[in-house]
Amino acid sequence: MSNYEIKDKGINKDSEATSAVSTISYEIENALINKTSARDINKQLETLQGNNKFPSNLQFIDAFYGPKTSSSGAAFLDNNTGKVIVGFAGTKW
């Protein structure tokens, strides 16, 4: 179990969906690096939503982190549009 706590980074319930996913993808990458499970990530995102710190229409699907390439991404379903939004953390090189 990880002790990493996902931070809202200024996101709130009214943040535009793709911007929110783009911003939170960096926090999800940090969580994955710190061995946080997808289940725990989801719980933390639901807590942020309950505190109006993340759009309630975005449902976390899954995320990945590749340690060899340092690439990561997170997928969310936008319940308002029915479309999936994928956010990738930027390069570290």
Image (spheres, grey):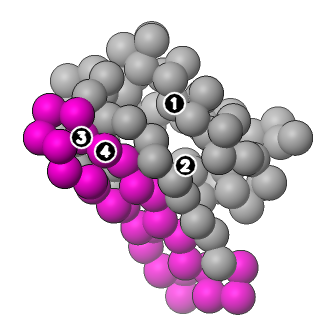
Query: Along the polypeptide, which appears first: circle 1 or circle 2?
Result: 2
- Closer to the chain start, of discs 2 and 3, is 2
Q: Secondary structure at mark 1?
A: helix
Residue 46: x percent and y percent?
50, 23
C-alpha distance separating marks 2 and 4: 18 Å
Residue 77 against residue 25 in the figure, above or below:
above
Q: Is residue 74 above or below residue 71?
A: above
**Which mark is on residue 77?**
4
Amino acid type, residue under disc 4 in the picture? Leu
Give the foreground label among 3 and 1: 3
Residue where numbered disc 3 is placed? 78
Regarding mark 3 in the picture, which secondary structure is present there? Answer: strand
Q: Nearest the camera: 83 or 29?
A: 83
Are the residues at dot 1 and dot 2 in contact (C-beta closer than 8 Å)? no
Determine whether, in the image, residue 89 is placed left or right of residue 57: right
What is the C-alpha distance between the residues marked 3 and 1?
Answer: 14 Å
Q: Are marks 3 and 1 in contact (CB under 8 Å)?
A: no
Q: CA distance from mark 1 to mark 4?
A: 13 Å
Which residue corresponds to the image point at 27% horizontal and 55% vertical from the top-left? Answer: 85
Name which residue lies at 61% across and 27% down. 43
C-alpha span from label 1 to label 2: 11 Å
Give residue 33's mark: none
Amino acid bearing label 2: Glu
